Image (cartoon, rainbow, N blue to C red):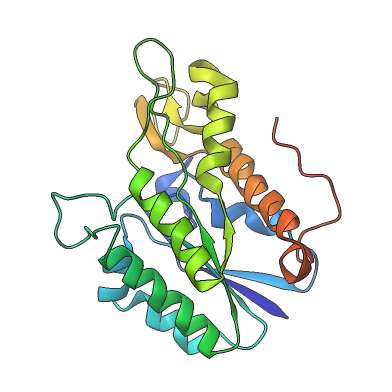
Amino acid sequence: MNKIFWAGDSTVQTNDYSTFPQTGIGQVFPIFLKEGYQVENHAKNGRSTKSFLDEGRFKAIEQRIGEGDFLFIQFGHNDEKKEDPARYTDPASSYRENLQLFVETARSRKAYPVLITPLERRCFEDGGELGQGAHGEYVAAMKQAARDWDVALVDLHGMSRTALQEAQELKSRSWYMYFEQGEYDEHPEESRDNTHLRYAGAVKFAGMIARGLQELGGIYGEMIIDMKIQNN
C-alpha cells in the first residue's frame, strides 16, 4: 500500500473531540483517495518548518517513508511569525532551506515530494474585499523552489483565494471556525477564528488539493478517485 505522509500545521492536522468542530485537511483527505493509498498525518497545530524539524517530528516520517510513498509538505502560517524565533523562518533563506531538507529526504528514500502552498485565511477587509493576506512571500518562495528543484506543486493558496473571493465574507464563514455562541454544545462560546477549519472547509480545500493532483497527472493523479472534483 502506498502511503501519503503529511508534514504541516493546524490547517492540516487530525483533530479529536477536544478541538471539535475543528477539522484538518489531512484528516478528511482520504475520502478523495482510491483504494491502495493511506494517509499518515504528522501535521501538528502551531508548527512551522523550523519547529517541525527542531522538535524531531520529521524523524518519525524519515523512519517510515519509503519507495513509492509521497510526502506532502504544507507550511507557511507559522513560518511568518516574526515575533516568535522558535518558529519564524525567512522566506528567502531558512524557509527555503527547510523545504529543501524535506524534499531531499523524500527523494533519498525514493519517495515523491509534493509542495502545497499554504491555505489562505479569511482576510476580508471592512469593505468586504479579500485582503492580501500574509502568506505572499512564502507562497512565492515555495513556487520558486518547486521550479528550481523540479518538484510537484499544488497551489492551494491560489485556489483558496479564488474560492473565498467567489463565496465572499458571509458564505465562507461556514468553512472556518467562525460561528455564533451556542451553535455547538461542545464549543458553546462564539468563535471568530479565520484560520482553522470546520468539516465543510476541510473537505472544500482537500478537494482543491485533489483537483491539483489530478491536474498534475501521472502518479499524482492516479491516487485520486475517478470523479470530477467540483469547487463551487
Rendered location of residue 42, percent (x, y):
46, 68
Rendered location of residue 225, percent (x, y):
81, 57
- Quarter of the image for the N terminus: give it: bottom right
What is the residue that sits farthest to the top in this orientation? 127
**Above or below 221: residue 155:** above
Residue under the point 37% across and 31% down: 132
What is the residue that sits farthest to the right in this orientation? 226
Residue under the point 31% across and 79% down: 56
Rendered location of residue 30, percent (x, y):
68, 59
**Above or below 167: residue 160:** below
Q: Nearer the viewer, residue 167 or 13?
A: 167
- Quarter of the image for the C terminus: give it: top right
Answer left or right for 160 relative to 97.
right
**Above or below 49: residue 139:** above
Answer left or right for 15 relative to 221.
left
Residue 7 appearing in the image: no
